[in-house]
């Protein structure tokens, strides 16, 4: 018993530590050092005067115009690259790092008009993992299984979230940023919603009133979350704090469930949720590094997206195994 309690405390400690370490690294877009560099500001000003006064956008390649690159945004991107190249060749005398952020982002090398190509690629890989999982759920879990609709909804919401992530990392506009944040929030909160439904089997008829109350609570939380960010204040720190806190709570629940179920069933797959949670915590630690993009393309945020592909695929395998075990137990009772 002492060993199992220690394991639970260890998991909880790692999860809580991830919150404590991650939140202070959240930055505000308006606070970027690169925006205030005189050489960057002068470059943008001159570029606009020379190139943008005519109003002729034909000099911008068609594939960039399709992604809504304008003369002004072209100047901004080009000057980020020029300033970064100059600072790498001649390190700043004040000791500041040569590669700095602009508008809250690292100066990525653009690829086919995509601002953060590796984040786009890894977001699409997560999307593919959800789509594959959705297909597996439909094939292997019968319609009669009570939790099937909850799992299908999880796959659908995950799909939407990673589509929004792909679009946002392709082109960062206010609307694509909001879509990404709100879809990610919905994905995390839905995980928080269905976790106790599975663990405590709130889908069973005797818990009908409690399930309705829990559904109302979660819907209310999401409406308040979106309302606060939309109508009151667009707050990056609050948004990350809320998402990480909700994620940590559900991860702790799944870790506890994993330990209890493995002790009862003595099957390796029963321990998968705890292992997946550990993987997610390690992947989340990528966000703590926040280093300039390697080769101008690959940064810590992209690696965080890469790190969630495997756990997503693995999670659907667990849901299927768990459902099969649940159905097997129902048949034995019958």
Image (cartoon, helix red, strand yellow):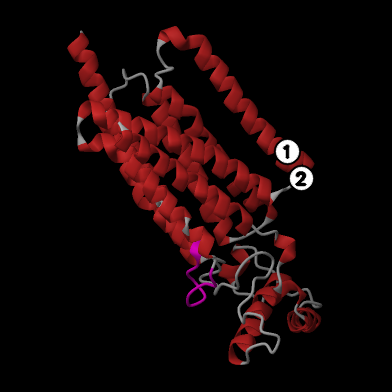
Determine if residue 233 is in view. yes
The x and y percentages for residue 296 are 52, 75
Q: Which label sits on residue 228?
A: 1
- Residue at coordinates 60% horizontally, 26% vertically from top-left? 219
Vertical relation: 211 (above or below) 135? above
Asked if disc 1 and disc 2 are in contact, CB closer than 8 Å, the reply is: yes
Q: Provide the residue span drawn in magenta.
A: 291-301
How many numbered marks does the figure carry? 2
As drawn, is 141 to the left or to the right of 175? left
As drawn, is 104 to the left or to the right of 270? right
Alpha-carbon neighbours of circle 1 within 10 Å: few (<14), some, or many (≥20)?
Answer: some
Q: Which label sits on residue 233?
A: 2
The x and y percentages for residue 244 are 55, 44
Name which of mark 1 and mark 2 comes first in the sequence.
1
Determine whether the residue tagged by mark 1 lies in a helix, strand or loop.
helix
Query: Image quarter for residue 41?
Result: bottom right
- Name the residue at the front extreme: 2
Vertical relation: 279 (above or below) 245? below
Determine whether the residue tagged by mark 2 lies in a helix, strand or loop.
loop
């Amino acid at each position: 018993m002492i060993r199992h309690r220690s394991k639970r405390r260890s998991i909880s400690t790692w999860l809580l530590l991830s919150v404590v370490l991650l939140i202070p690294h959240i930055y505000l877009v308006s606070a970027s050092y690169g925006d205030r560099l005189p050489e960057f500001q002068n470059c943008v000003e001159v570029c606009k005067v020379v190139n943008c006064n005519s109003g002729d956008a034909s000099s911008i390649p068609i594939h960039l115009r399709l992604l809504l690159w304008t003369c002004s945004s072209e100047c901004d991107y080009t000057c980020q690259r020029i300033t970064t190249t100059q600072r790498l060749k001649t390190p700043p005398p004040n000791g500041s790092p040569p590669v700095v952020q602009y508008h809250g982002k690292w100066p990525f090398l653009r690829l086919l008009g995509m601002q953060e190509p590796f984040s786009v690629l890894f977001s699409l890989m997560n999307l593919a993992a959800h789509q594959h999982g959705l297909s597996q759920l439909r094939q292997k879990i019968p319609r009669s299984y009570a939790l099937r609709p909850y799992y299908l909804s999880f796959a659908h919401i995950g799909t939407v979230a990673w589509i929004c992530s792909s679009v946002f990392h392709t082109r960062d506009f206010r609307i694509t940023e909001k879509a990404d944040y709100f879809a990610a929030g919905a994905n995390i909160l839905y995980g928080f919603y269905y976790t106790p439904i599975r663990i405590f089997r709130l889908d069973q008829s005797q818990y009908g009133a409690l399930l309705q109350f829990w559904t109302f609570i979660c819907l209310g939380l999401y409406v308040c979350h979106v309302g606060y960010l939309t109508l009151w204040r667009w707050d990056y720190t609050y948004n990350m704090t809320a998402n990480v806190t909700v994620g940590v709570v559900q991860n702790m629940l799944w870790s506890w469930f994993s330990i209890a179920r493995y002790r009862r069933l003595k099957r390796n797959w029963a321990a998968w949720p705890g292992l997946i949670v550990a993987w997610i915590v390690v992947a989340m630690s990528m966000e703590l590094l926040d280093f300039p993009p390697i080769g101008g393309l690959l940064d810590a945020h992209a690696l965080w997206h890469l790190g969630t592909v495997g756990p997503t695929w693995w999670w659907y395998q667990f849901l299927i195994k768990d459902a099969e075990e649940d159905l097997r137990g129902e048949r034995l009772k019958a």
